Amino acid sequence: MRKIKLFLGIALVGIIAAAYFNYPKLNLMSGFASKNMVSSVFIADRDPVDITLNDNDIPLVNLSDCTVSEADESATATVYGFMPRTAVYKEGVGAVLTNKEFSKHNFELIPNRFVTKDSLPFPYGNNGVTDTVLENVDYDKLEVAFSNAFKDSEQKTRTLLVVHKNQIIGERYLRGFSKDTKILGWSMTKSILSTLYGILEYQGKMKMDFKPFSEEIRMKSPKHNITIDHLLRMSSGLAWDENYFKISDVTRMLFLDSDMTLAQRNKDVIAAPIEIWNYSSGTTNLLSGILREQFNTHQEYLDFPYKTLIDKIGMHSMLLETDLTGNYILSSYGWATTRDWAKFGLLYLNKGDWNGERIFSESWADYVSKPTQNSDGTYGAHFWLNAEGKYPDISHELYSANGFQGQRVFIIPSKELVVVRTGLEEQTDEQFNTLLKEIIASIR
């Protein structure tokens, strides 16, 4: 009997300890569930049941129970009835997670959109696609690549689009998705942020050696040596923990912070610039905050991405979400159709030229695809690289915008090729290598 009591006592202590250490995680679990639900329903116009069974069916998050209110354009999630978190859709700026400070903020300012009617086909317009068959493309081989990408249910590919010589040569969608379905790019949005700095540079309003912390030299802070270049290359030396499976810097920022530009800004320096490479979503949102400081008004900041990039190249489906204080969350929350993500890739394939109009300097594409020191040839300036042959059968010139769960925009200049793959499961380097190899094999 004494042994049983001892065993029960130990078990009880274990349960209490587990509850104590995991209770704070409930905030993140229900926060992810409600935020993702609202964005997917009210931005992407998808079915809440499908989102519950698929998008929110990931470890820990799938313990959440989420209720959608169409009338309020909101969703509330709990974990076994505990830790309710509510997200609300706001026109023009997407879904925001509410907190104790929510009532202090208004959402009257929204981005102006610059949509113009056009009669051109993809990519320079939205009036259908060119129907021409390219003689140098083996469409039978291309069909094999598409079939392989979708045949394995474990891969969970949702959309796949291939553009060659500015023309769509292959396009396929999983049931429930179409050319009009907005896809969350996750960290592909980081490459949008980088491009905005490229535009500022081209306009003569920003230099990559600009030091956003220069005033801190008075406080003898080592931050004063950090430049925009260091931040774009994730080599600032600022501390950051990018771990999505625990309470970390990135999960606190995305699911608890009202102003997401401050999380990285407030971190200590742990190394001199370029001494280490450390991937950080906080750095991207810090850059979003620095971007905002370049404008006289909040409205100018909100308009800038759409006026100079997104609507300028016809990515009219794209929506960038903001935090409670109106900062773009460019680390993670950019939505667009697969075709519009492809337009973004084509802008880089054409080195900043869009149907005769220059968006950023030709050298900017070279800059973002130049390997960053200590990244083992895998990272440029908010773009991922193949410089060291991560994909062994693909040219080392390849660079890409990458996002969580295998969202990709691949750019292969020598093949005049852009490949967009979106899905619900991260692919291995081997799987991506095979996909790209099969696609390239279809081009003579």
Image (cartoon, helix red, strand yellow):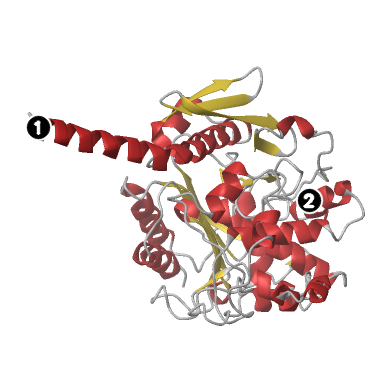
Q: From where the camera sits, is residue 328 visible?
A: yes
Other-residue count near label 2 (Cα within 10 Å), few / some / many at <14 / 14–19 / ≥20: many
User: Mark 1: which secondary structure?
Assistant: helix
Quadrant housing residue 43 = top right
- Residue flagged by tag 2: what amino acid is it? Tyr
**Dot 1 corresponds to which residue?**
2
Q: From where the camera sits, is residue 359 visible?
A: no
Quick one: which residue is furthest to the top in this view? 71
Q: Distance between the residues labelled 2 and 1?
A: 70 Å
Question: Residue at left 44%, top 59%?
Answer: 139
Looking at this view, is 129 or 387 the one in front? 387
Quick one: which residue is furthest to the right in this view? 296
Question: Residue at left 55%, top 25%?
Answer: 76
Other-residue count near label 1 (Cα within 10 Å), few / some / many at <14 / 14–19 / ≥20: few
Quadrant housing residue 23 = top left
Looking at this view, is 427 or 311 the one in front? 427
Q: Classify residue 262 as left or right of residue 342.
A: right
Q: Classify residue 196 as left or right of residue 391.
A: right
| Residue 332, horizontal then vertical, whole percent | 60, 51
